């Protein structure tokens, strides 16, 4: 199998790994809640000690008063059966309550449930609408999922350019999977008007993805290195460092 074949296989596997791993990309909110900080923090502390029933009790009272952050966390407990009987129906209910108050993380979690068909029939369109709500607040995980939907053509026509645009947003908001998929598309020329590979940009984003813990991006980096001189590799490494150290504000290629 050639290196290019490995790259395509790795990209096609992203859809399936997403089903297992992206549920917990935004597990708990650490916001302070005016007037209710003490019970909210008590719930967080209980979770740290794996005292799930205590966390459930702390957040349930807050959720019933309409606190969006507590509703979101209660949905998480129901989703995974921590401190309460596992129930996707209840998870959807509390995520929806939090999402209706504009909480981006709750919109994302609803999207993941719809995407995977947990608690309701699988529905890519509903998932997309939830991810769009979260993406309006620049939540990288939802921007990545929108890119994946367009990349795979899930419930709509496949569109590499739109996929790439969302992966760019996700990458610049620090989402490692967005960084990897952007590097892959740049390396193989997907989403480029002339289908031209861009190994220099691919080198930069794959290096960043690796530094952020996604070691599978080494396949993209290895392929990019084959097409770049040592001088260009040094330049790309410097740009990657500047991009990451600036929190993706400076020198990050699109």
Image (tube, helix red, strand yellow):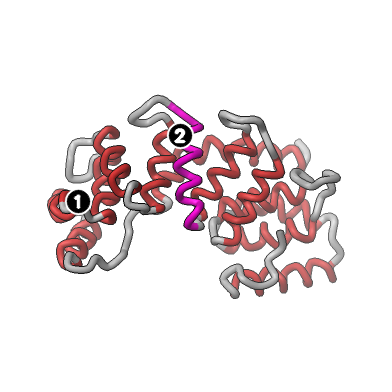
- Crowd around label 1: few <14 · some 14–19 · many ≥20 (10 Å): many
Residue 247 vs residue 107: left or right?
right
Disc 1 on helix, strand or loop? helix
Q: Which residue is found at the position 67% from the left and 48% from the top?
A: 164
Is residue 40 shown above or below 101? below
Image side of residue 199 versus residue 63, left or right = right
Q: Which residues are magenta?
A: 122-137
Of residues 176 and 154, the one nearer the viewer is 154
Main secondary structure found in the magenta portion: helix
Q: Where is residue 189 shown, x and y percent of the image? A: 79, 46
Confirm whether the magenta stretch covers residue 173.
no
143 or 85: nearer the eye?
143
Residue beneath the point at 45% across and 42% down:
130
Q: Quadrant of residue 153?
A: top right
Relative height, residue 157 to residue 82 (above, below): above
Residue 104 placement (x, y as % from top left): 41, 53
Could you tell me which residue is drawn at 72 percent across and 69 percent down?
237
Number of the label disc, if any, that sits on residue 126: 2
Residue 63: mark: 1
State yes or no: discs 1 and 2 in contact (Cβ < 8 Å). no
Comparing 208 with 171, the one in front is 171
Q: Residue at x 56, y 55 (%)?
A: 176
């Amino acid at each position: 199998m050639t290196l290019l074949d490995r790259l395509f296989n790795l990209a096609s596997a992203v859809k399936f790994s997403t089903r297992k791993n992206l549920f917990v990309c935004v597990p708990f909110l650490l916001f302070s809640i005016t007037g209710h900080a003490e019970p909210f923090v008590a719930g967080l502390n209980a979770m740290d000690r794996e005292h799930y029933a205590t966390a459930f009790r702390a957040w349930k009272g807050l959720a019933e008063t309409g606190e969006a952050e507590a509703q979101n966390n209660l949905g998480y407990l129901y989703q995974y059966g921590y401190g309460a009987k596992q129930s996707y129906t209840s998870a959807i209910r509390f995520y929806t309550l939090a999402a209706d108050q504009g909480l981006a993380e709750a919109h994302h979690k609803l999207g993941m449930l719809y995407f995977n068909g947990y608690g309701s029939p699988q529905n890519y369109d509903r998932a997309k609408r939830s991810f769009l709500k979260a993406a309006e607040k620049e939540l990288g995980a939802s921007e990545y999922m929108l890119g994946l939907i367009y990349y795979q053509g899930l419930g709509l026509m496949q569109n590499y350019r739109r996929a790439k645009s969302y992966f760019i947003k996700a990458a610049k908001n620090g989402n490692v999977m967005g960084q990897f998929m952007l590097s892959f598309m740049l390396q193989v020329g997907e989403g480029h008007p002339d289908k031209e590979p861009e190994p220099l940009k691919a080198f930069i984003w794959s290096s960043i993805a690796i530094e952020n813990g996604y070691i599978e991006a080494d396949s993209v980096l290895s392929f990019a290195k084959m097409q770049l001189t040592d001088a260009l590799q040094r330049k790309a490494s410097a740009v990657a460092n500047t991009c990451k150290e600036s929190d993706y504000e400076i020198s990050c290629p699109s």
